[in-house]
Amino acid sequence: MAKRIYVTRSLPQPVIDRLTDANFDVEVYPEDQVIPRSVLLDKAGGRDGILCILTDFIDREVLERADQAKIIANYAVGFNNIDLEEATRRRIAITNTPGVLTDATADLAWSLLMATARRIVESDNYLRAGKFEGWGPLHFLGQDITGTTLGVIGLGRIGQAFARRGAAFGMNILYYSNRRNTEFEESYPHTAEHVSLEELLQKSDYVSIHVPMTPDTIHMIGERELRMMQPHAILINTARGPIVDEEALVQALKNQWIWGAGLDVYEEEPKVHPELIPLPNAVLCPHIGSATTSTRTRMGLMAADNIIAYFEGRRPPNLLNPEVWEQGS
């Protein structure tokens, strides 16, 4: 019998084709919205594999219902939506989609940086409201980018890709990471220095977050950290929302502890702190870091290939809990 795969959200058609061409029995949740919890629990049973997205919380309850599942392929790099420990205990392989969305996310982080620094959204709204009556020397003054200092929190794949783009603007890099990366420092054409988080916050003109969400990084940026930043500094977050204390960020923006923020992720996503919405010094996107046609398709194909590999008896390329495979599941 064909292995039964459940896909929790409509994905680019080549992804579904990849699975059906590999002779899987594929069912896709038909609505373009987050799958209701009740439906996820119902559909998890009797499936050999599940392809889920980052808004699906694959916790103990779901894993209990997934009584037949051998693999769950997450359509995301981050996997904080999955109880990895419980899945491993149940000998269910968990995979993700690293690398494929690096450039798209780095590009989006830069888009937020530039839009915030140059007040693009604010001035666009001003023009569309019919308020533009001619050039003025004091209209929409923003922040310089060229020759400034870029602070990068987390120097993984996306953090490095984001930082390297700063070379085109002659920016010096301060980065905070668990380990010093001398290869990056030597290859970057301007100054790149490994520093403490405190020094990065105090000296950077722009601060961009690129760490995963873990218990240690929740509210990594709170009131204390925001008050360390310079009054003209801008904060960018394309990682995970709970890394920033959103209430503290609202106060920082309203009271001008910092100059602005560009956000693609939120603490209680899809809810956004209501006091962020009207702030003119906040540029807000609806979690579109990887949202290019090519990237979203490649993410799905990677997830599908992880499932295919597993059922062909090959170790999935992006396996997050290798002990499951080593135990001979």
Image: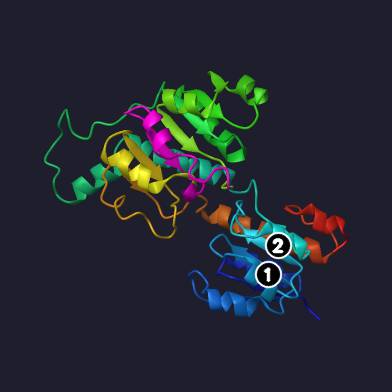
- Quarter holding the N terminus is bottom right
Which span is picked out in magenta? 215-242
Residue 269 vs residue 291, the one in the foreground: 269
| Picture coordinates of residue 71, whole percent (x, y) | 74, 65
Q: Quadrant of residue 231?
A: top left
Q: Which mark is residue 86?
A: 2
The disc labelled 1 sits on which kind of residue? Leu
Residue 83 vs residue 127, the one in the foreground: 83
As displayed, is residue 211 above or below residue 2? above
As displayed, is residue 62 above or below residue 120? below
The disc labelled 2 sits on which kind of residue? Glu
The residue that label 1 is drawn on is 63
Which residue is at the far right? 328
- Quarter holding the C terminus is bottom right
| Picture coordinates of residue 78, whole percent (x, y) | 60, 51
> Residue at position x 88%, y 61% from top?
328
| Picture coordinates of residue 256, whole percent (x, y) | 28, 35
